[in-house]
Amino acid sequence: MTRPDPRTPPVRRADAMAAGHTDGRLRRSHVALFRGVHVERGVPVTLAVRIEAALLVVTPGSHVSHHTAANLWGGVVPDHPDIHLSSPRNRTRRDGITAHRRKEGQEVVRFGGFRVTSPVQTFLDLAHCLTLVDLVVLGDSLVRRGRTTPEQLVSATCRHHGPYSRLARKAAALVRTGVDSAMETRLRLLIVLAGLPEPEVDHRVHDRDGTLLRRYDLSYLPYRLVIEYDGRQHAESEEQWLTDIARDEALDDERIRRLVVVSRDIYSTPGNTLTRITRAMRRAGMPVPRLRDDWRRHFPGRPGDMAVPA
């Protein structure tokens, strides 16, 4: 049996019928992506294929936007099962497609073979949908992929007016260059929203020849304190484990304290995590201000978390 060409485009049911298919033949040779839109069996159903299929059933002139645009640009956003498109009229009601009304002045470019909102426009649009923390995660990830810069986001949000523009400006002001992961963003925001001094992001140590020796996620190097997020992959990779051992020995030699935070410290026990951080700050000789309560809204703890960080 010949496998279908992975570039075979999706097809409307009506067009397949017009080309000579019957319902039975179409069911045997194709799978439905959306009601009335099919693709040959065996074709990998990638994001691009799903977008192409969705564009067949929405208003002509529609473009990719919101969560789907963020995915195309390589940005990090909460998972959403639908394909998001903006249309001159958002009357499309199909399972698997979220249609938004196209806004006046939206910046739309061509990327990946599609008309899609620009990275900056995508950030502005998602201010209507995301929390502050998720919006900063998106901004940091777009900067990491080289799609925009913190300065461009700040400039765009300062010109932006309307609903959620204040949230967009606040999030843009918190976007940084050199952030390695979404969890690193969340850890930094837990610290900042609690009113603690913002740590330096992505400090790099090189030898005399310019070779990178190590990098610190978040650091207060004048006080010899480093705070880092460790994901599960660190425990599963022998190479990473050996690298961590060498790094920790180097930190010991320089008398630098390394405080490690894992996923549950952020999602389940943020209050306890702030207690650990403030204790480490005081031991390092840092001035620690009275904590603000802003962090509680964005990082709700689970039962057993410390109610009032020390």
Image (tube, rainbow, N blue to C red):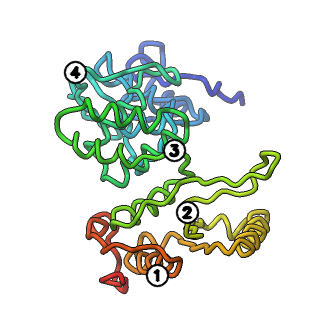
Looking at the rendered image, the disc whose residue lies closer to the viewer, 4 or 1, is 1
Q: Residues within 10 Å of mark 2 (few under 14, many from 20)?
A: many
The residue depicted at 57 percent of the width and 34 percent of the height is 41
First in sequence: mark 4 vs mark 1? 4
Q: Can you give x and y, in whole percent of width and height, for residue 274 in the image?
A: 41, 75
Q: Does the CB distance between marks 3 and 2 fall below 8 Å?
A: no
Badge 3 or badge 2: first in the primary sequence: 3
Nearer to us in this view, 190 or 240: 190
Q: CA distance from mark 3 to mark 2?
A: 14 Å
Which residue in the protein does label 3 denote?
A: 177
Label 2 vs 1, first from the N-terminus: 2
Q: Nearer the viewer, mark 3 or mark 2?
A: 2
| Mark 4 or mark 2: whose residue is earlier in sequence | 4
Q: Amino acid at mark 4?
A: Glu
Q: Which residue is mark 2?
A: 219
Disc 4: which residue: 104
What's the residue at 32%, 41% (across, down)?
126
Mark 1 and mark 3 in contact? Answer it, CB < 8 Å.
Answer: no
Residue 253 coordinates in the image, percent (x, y): 75, 74
Left or right for 51, reference 213 = left
Q: Residues within 10 Å of mark 3 (few under 14, many from 20)?
A: some
Indicate whether 248 appears above or below 5.
below
Say how many tags the image has. Answer: 4
Which amino acid, mark 3? Thr
Query: Is residue 272 depicted above or below 29 in this figure?
Result: below
User: Residue under circle 1?
Assistant: 279
Instruction: State the separation of the CA atoms marked 4 and 2.
Output: 43 Å
Residue 125 lies, in percent from the top left, at 30, 36
Secondary-structure class at tag 3: loop
Mark 4 in CB contact with mark 2 (< 8 angstroms): no
Please report the residue visible at 38 percent of the width from the left and 49 percent of the height from the top: 174
